[in-house]
Image (cartoon, rainbow, N blue to C red):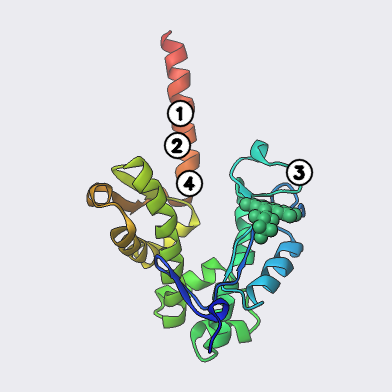
Amino acid sequence: MTSALFSPIRLADLELPNRIVVAPMCQYSAADGVATDWHVTHLGMLANSGAGLVVVEATHVERRGRITHGCLGLYSDDCEAALARVSARDARLAAIENPSSALGRALADGREIDGVLVWELARAGDPTAIAVLERLGEWLGIGIITIVNALNPDVVVVGGGVAQAGELILAPARQVLARRGLPAPVRQVELRPARFGRDAGVIGAALLARESIARRVVA
Ligand SMILES: Cc1cc2nc3c(=O)[nH]c(=O)nc-3n(C[C@H](O)[C@H](O)[C@H](O)COP(=O)(O)O)c2cc1C
């Protein structure tokens, strides 16, 4: 008889192979919020441990919101790039599992498996790279639906580098929204890529600054 601990469990859309969950554990090992080799090893080891789910330590969206100087953050481009390196693991695993795919061949050629490469190969039609982006889109959808259910916005704009993948990521995200959202907010919300892509935040900040200066000049 299989024990309950080692039997699969479904949590909403998430199917876990077993019920072992690794709790989040602050490592106090980040450098100004940036994940280090420690995190690659720590999370990589846990991800390969066989546990059904691994929860990443508290990750702070504001520098001043951190508990200690060693806390993990997601408030700068450096933070984003470092965590991408940790999470590119999904793409690396897909490459290992599908050695004859374009992604698998890129790994065998010694290329760095990062978001840009996955996007390029997905655009060129590699099914393994497309599957990696689809999974990413599903995770994005899960993150967005929490906000949509709580705040009921008309539009959610996805900016930054991830928006470049366009429908490859947004289409699966929309499917998650439709599946998991409350009917009223999901009916009206529109999920679209930022027109200014990576520069959206900078352009928005510049506009705010210009408006603020214009108000002062008028006053
Ligand atoms: C060193 C240490 C770091 C922890 N870091 C976090 C954290 O980053 N985020 C969080 O939500 N909980 C954190 N916790 C709480 C644990 O995830 C867990 O909830 C707690 O240890 C109780 O789990 P238990 O009932 O299985 O012992 C931390 C606990 C310890 C001991």
**Alpha carbon separation for disc pair 1 and 4:** 14 Å
Identity, as a three-letter code, of the amino acid under mark 2: Gly
Question: Which is in the foreground here, disc 2 or disc 3?
Answer: 3
Identity, as a three-letter code, of the amino acid under mark 1: Leu
Q: Is residue 183 in view from this perspective? A: yes
- Where is mark 3, residue-wise? 69
**Alpha carbon separation for disc pair 3 and 1:** 31 Å
Circle 3 — which element? Answer: loop
Question: Which is in the foreground here, disc 3 or disc 4?
Answer: 3
Q: Is residue 194 in view from this perspective? A: no
Q: Position of residue 191 (x, y in %)?
A: 32, 53
Crowding around mark 3 (Cα neighbors within 10 Å: few <14, some 14 to 19, many 20+) is some
- Where is mark 2, residue-wise? 204
- Where is mark 4, residue-wise? 199
**Alpha carbon separation for disc pair 1 and 2:** 6 Å
Of 192 and 199, the residue lying toward us: 192
- Where is mark 1, residue-wise? 208
Q: Position of residue 185 (x, y in %)?
A: 27, 47
**Alpha carbon separation for disc pair 2 and 3:** 29 Å
| Ligand 1 under 8 Å from disc 1 Cβ | no
| x 76%, y 63%: residue | 38
Marked residue nearer the N-terminal end (2 or 4)? 4
Which residue lies most toward the top here? 219
| x 23%, y 47%: residue | 184
Where on the image, by quarter, is ligand 1? bottom right
